[in-house]
Structures are given as C-alpha cells and as structure tokens.
Image (cartoon, grey):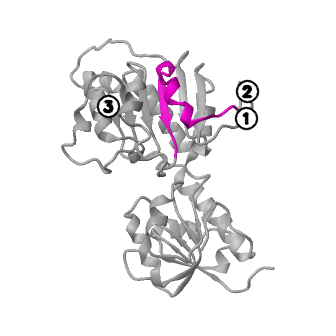
Amino acid sequence: MTRSKRLLVSVPTPSLAASITQLEVAASLECITWDLTTPSPAPHIDLVVLPYQQEPRLAASLGRTTTRLVQAQTIGYEDVLAHLPAGHTVANARSVHETSTAELALGLTLASLRRIPEYTTAAQRHAWHQQPGQSLADRTVAIVGYGGVGKAIEHRLSGFEANVLRFARSARGAEGGPDHVQPISSLKALLAEIDVVILTVPLTEETRHLVDASFLAAMRQGSLLVNVARGPVVDTEALVAALEAGRIRAALDVTDPEPLPLGHRLWDLDGALITPHVGGASSAMHPRMVALIGRQLRALLADEKPGNVVAHP
C-alpha cells in the first residue's frame, strides 16, 4: 500500500536538493536543505541524508528528531553510529562509491609502481629521469577486504595479468577456485610472497592497526602498501618507520590523522604517494547517490524496507 502523505526529506546541499526534485517521486516529497550544523528544521523528517565526509559529531544533531531512515553518503558507517543518538535506522551508500574507489586504488597502484610522481617531479625540473619502475604484470596482489570495493578492484585488475589473492574476515569459496577468499588471519604468513597489498577493510576493533610494525616487517622488501580503507587500519608511526628505512612504498588515500597535518613526516617521505581521501569523490558520485536516494524514497513511499540498512533502533 502506498502512503498518500508526502515525505519530508532533508539533504545537505542545494545541488542534491535540486536533483531530488527531478526524481519521478518528487510530487510525493517535500525536500529541504539541512546540513546538520543548525538545529533540526522539523521534529520528524522521514529521510535524512547526512553530509559527505564532514565532522561525524554532526550526527548528534538528530537527538531530538525522529526519522524513518538516516542515509549516509559513505560506505563506512562506524563514525555515524558512534555519534548518532539511539532510535534511528541507518543505511550506508553501498553501490555509490565502489567503482570510483576501485579506480583510485588501481591508479595509486600503477602510479607508485611505475614511478609517475618521480617522473612528474623530474619533469617540473626539466630533468629526463629514466629510472625504470615496476610492472603490475606478473605481480602478486593481495586484496584485503573482499566486499564491494575489493571485488570492484579485482574486476579492474583482471586485464593486468597479475596474480590476485583475496582476504576477508573469514574464508569462503572453494580452495583454489576463482572465488576463493582466505581469512585475514592467514595473510601475515604470506606477505613475503606478495608484491602489492591493497587495503579495503572496514574499520573495526579487529582491523584497527591491522598493519602494524610486525605486519610491515613481514612484507617483501620493496613491496607496495595501498590504503583506500580507513586511516587507522594502518599504524602511522610504524608506517613512517618502514618508509624511512626504505623497506616498502605506500600509496595512501586515507591517513591517521586525517586530514594529514601540515608538517607531518608522511608528506616528505620517499616512497609515499598521498591523495586526500577522494576515493569515492568523482563525477560518478552525485548521480549514483541520487539514484540510491530515489530507491530509498520509493521504498518508504511503498512502506517497504529500504536497502543498505546497517543499523536498526
């Protein structure tokens, strides 16, 4: 049964509001702009879309507002749940960021292996820097975290003739088969044979500082660590020490702390390639986010369960 009452929807930006008003369900909506930095504009809002990559404590602004659904604009939702008052159903942005994050992970990998930053810096000095880089072909790549982003990365690696190993919280799939996923607990023993480690795991108590001093010490000399997960998955001090020793290289879209402060040692270390947490922030994000919001609104209008729900009251 479809509700006759119009839904009140809040979104954090005017551009998102403009796109929502173009949806086929727009006649059944009242859309307002609210970025959670001011008091709630209504005691009840059917769907609240959270700001993207802003201060997680803003979620506490929903303390005196009831909702049917709180929609995050990120796949990770740990920070939201840490600050959101009880009583709200939360959905993450699965389906929005996987493609863009996988593209960046592959871009960081290729740029670091093929020494693109070094060539670019040399070119700015008008220097012909011909030190050869490493190929991705014939390398062993470990994808650590095999959810949507991990699978999207493997899909994009398929044409590069690399040997891909998959790791997740628990093993699944037939051993030796194309869908075989090994437990993360077995990763450290294999690190000496792995050339590229790509992190896509969610941040949990189990994965916080998963990459610590002992993990880095077990990595193959000259191997590459790529982090498109969350900064605290890596122990920053241990990573700095490994980079200073020249043992490994690192390509990081996320850091701990974040944003990386002016003057932090990571900025100036050889072998470190840093991007400012832009894995999902591409031209693909806005239309995919609008499409997800549209699906959620149709579900709410039909009194059906919305998708991507990660937490209930």
Q: Label 3, secondary structure: give it.
A: strand
Residues under numbered marks 1 and 2 in contact, where contact means CB atoms less than 8 Å apart? yes
Q: Label 2, secondary structure: give it.
A: loop
Residue with the most extreme left position = 263
**Rendered location of residue 65, percent (x, y):** 50, 83
Q: Which residue is mark 3?
A: 272
Judge whether residue 35 can be spotted in this image.
no
Quote the CA–CA distance across marks 3 and 1: 35 Å
The three-letter code of the residue at mark 2 reads Gly
Residue with the most extreme right position = 1
Magenta span of residues: 180-201
Q: Give the number of the disc on residue 173.
A: 1
Q: Residues within 10 Å of mark 3 (few under 14, many from 20)?
A: many
**Rendered location of residue 253, percent (x, y):** 40, 42
Q: Which residue is mark 2?
A: 177
The three-letter code of the residue at mark 3 reads Ala
Q: Is residue 81 above or below residue 204?
A: below
Quick check: is 183 in the magenta stretch? yes
Quick check: is 243 in the magenta stretch? no
Q: Nearer the viewer, residue 114 or 199?
A: 199
The three-letter code of the residue at mark 1 reads Gly
Q: Give the number of the disc on residue 225.
A: none
Residue at 51% x, 49% y: name it. 202
Of the two numbered discs 3 and 2 in the rendering, the one whose residue sits closer to the viewer: 2
Q: Quadrant of residue 3?
A: bottom right
Count all numbered tags in the image, as a single digit: 3
